[in-house]
Image (cartoon, rainbow, N blue to C red):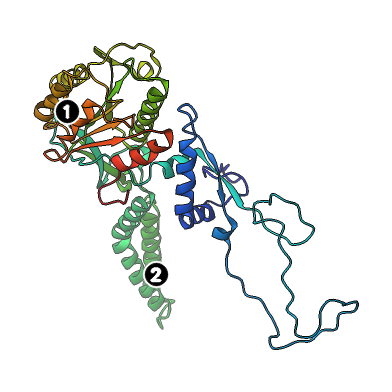
């Protein structure tokens, strides 16, 4: 009875779907899909951001050239019942009832095609969503006291677990062993068989001395064959297992500080835009980097390190002292994230309305203490009007190339600004 076999289909595509064809389609219409994803993001809320999307491609983008067969030349027809046209008249093409996606007015003539609609899965949507993004200036830091370990192949070993058994290498070793151990025996058997044939063909084969030598030769051949049969087909010394060793590798450890203004001047619209920005940042970091710390800081007149849930859903508010968040960020860096071992990043969202005596202090904190330690710091102002904090931060752009600042005045601007701030080095905005 043959052994029971179990086949498990682990492909991501469903029934009657082709993974290869779908991937080629996504690559071919990458620009149209990317534009459709950008438009979809601008109209989504925070909670339904990480979902699939129905993408509509105009028929003009997916149409392909076709070849038709025609006789060519001039052709003449006689149409019975014709009372409108004479020879030489040009007949206009019938008007279409729509432009591909359905017209606004009905028509009794013409024909058209609907736009092509297909569904992007959640994974495909997020892959396009975060394409060409990366943390700027990310470098591998030095080996820490507890370095990261990476497994590497290191040949084969004679000891190991059954799941690491290399069948081909083991059978190759067994074959080599059997050839080596049985080589002399098989050579002797071939010589004895040739000698036996010679004895049997001898003119005096019937004599007692010749018969005795034949019997002795046959007995020796049988003894050698029995010895060859006792060589094991597979011996424990033939088994070979894949060997893997762990080696320390430099650790690309990174931490992102998220600073959000929740003061009284931040109305619901501005808070919503700030949350949308940080939600994009949170999804981007957690999907692309396995080992990254996130530090969430909310501030009004006082700053506090909070959990992820409190950062996005707490309702506490108050006055505005932005420097409190920067002081807390600096203290956390000094205490937990030494710059020699960590890639440090910061992202700040505020409407820019700050206590006028505090904005200069914020600029000084960034200039002297924070920016020298971080790889990249991004400031997003969720208001169009330039407040005193914006004016102070503008002075940091020229001396600090790792500092960037942008404005967001509408929800539709969040995604382009986010991509501009975190695009890969050398990639177009």
User: On the picture, is 162 further left or further right than 254?
Assistant: right
Residue in the foreground of this view, choosing between 51 and 323 = 323
- Secondary structure, mark 2, is helix
Residue 86 found in image quarter = bottom right
Q: Relative to 199, is 51 on the left or the right?
A: right
Please say if 328 is above or below 26.
above
Q: Secondary structure at mark 1?
A: loop
Q: Quadrant of residue 324?
A: top left
Q: Residues within 10 Å of mark 2 (few under 14, many from 20)?
A: many
Q: CA distance from mark 2 to mark 1?
A: 76 Å
How far across and down, in percent of the image, does residue 372 sit? 11, 32
Q: Which residue is mark 1?
A: 146
**Residue underneath mark 2:** 214
Q: Are marks 2 and 1 in contact (CB under 8 Å)?
A: no
Query: Can the viewer see residue 246 in this picture?
Result: yes
Nearest the viewer among 401 and 84 is 84
Can residue 422 be seen here? The reply is no
- Establish if 228 lies above or below 304: below
């Amino acid at each position: 009875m043959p052994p029971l076999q179990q086949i498990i289909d682990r492909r991501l595509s469903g029934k009657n779907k082709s993974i290869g064809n779908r991937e080629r389609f996504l690559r071919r219409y990458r620009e149209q899909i990317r534009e459709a994803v950008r438009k979809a993001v601008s109209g989504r809320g925070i909670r339904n951001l990480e979902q699939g999307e129905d993408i509509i491609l105009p028929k003009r983008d997916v149409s392909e050239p076709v070849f038709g067969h025609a006789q060519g030349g001039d052709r003449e027809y006689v149409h019975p019942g014709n009372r409108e046209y004479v020879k030489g008249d040009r007949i206009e093409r019938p008007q279409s009832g729509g432009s591909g996606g359905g017209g606004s007015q009905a028509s009794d003539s013409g024909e058209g095609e609907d736009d092509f609609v297909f569904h992007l899965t959640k994974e495909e949507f997020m892959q396009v969503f975060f394409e060409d993004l990366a943390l700027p200036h990310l470098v591998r830091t030095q080996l820490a006291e507890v370095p990261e370990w990476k497994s590497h192949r290191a040949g084969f070993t004679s000891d190991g677990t059954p799941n690491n058994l290399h069948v081909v290498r083991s059978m190759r070793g067994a074959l080599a062993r059997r050839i080596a151990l049985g080589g002399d025996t098989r050579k002797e058997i071939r010589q004895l068989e040739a000698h036996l044939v010679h004895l049997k063909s001898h003119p005096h084969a019937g004599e007692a001395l010749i018969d005795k030598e034949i019997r002795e030769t046959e007995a020796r051949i049988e003894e050698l064959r029995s010895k060859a049969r006792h060589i094991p087909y597979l011996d424990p010394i033939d088994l070979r297992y894949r060997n893997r060793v762990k080696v320390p590798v430099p650790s690309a450890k990174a931490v992102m500080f998220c600073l959000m203004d929740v003061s009284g001047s931040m109305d619901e619209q501005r808070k919503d835009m700030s949350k949308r920005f940080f939600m994009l940042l949170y999804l981007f970091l957690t999907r692309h980097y396995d080992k990254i710390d996130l530090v969430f800081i909310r501030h009004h007149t006082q700053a506090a390190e909070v959990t992820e849930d409190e950062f996005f859903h707490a309702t506490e508010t108050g006055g505005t002292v932005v420097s409190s968040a920067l002081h807390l960020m600096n203290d956390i860096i000094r205490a937990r994230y030494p710059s020699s071992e960590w890639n440090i990043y910061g992202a700040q969202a505020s409407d820019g309305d700050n206590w006028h005596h505090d904005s200069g202090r914020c600029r000084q904190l960034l200039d002297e203490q924070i920016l020298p330690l971080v790889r990249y710091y991004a400031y997003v102002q969720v208001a169009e009007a330039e407040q005193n904090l914006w004016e102070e931060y503008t002075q940091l752009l020229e001396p600090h190339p790792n500092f960037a600042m942008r404005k967001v005045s509408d929800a539709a601007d969040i995604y382009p600004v986010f991509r501009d701030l975190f695009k890969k080095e050398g990639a177009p905005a």
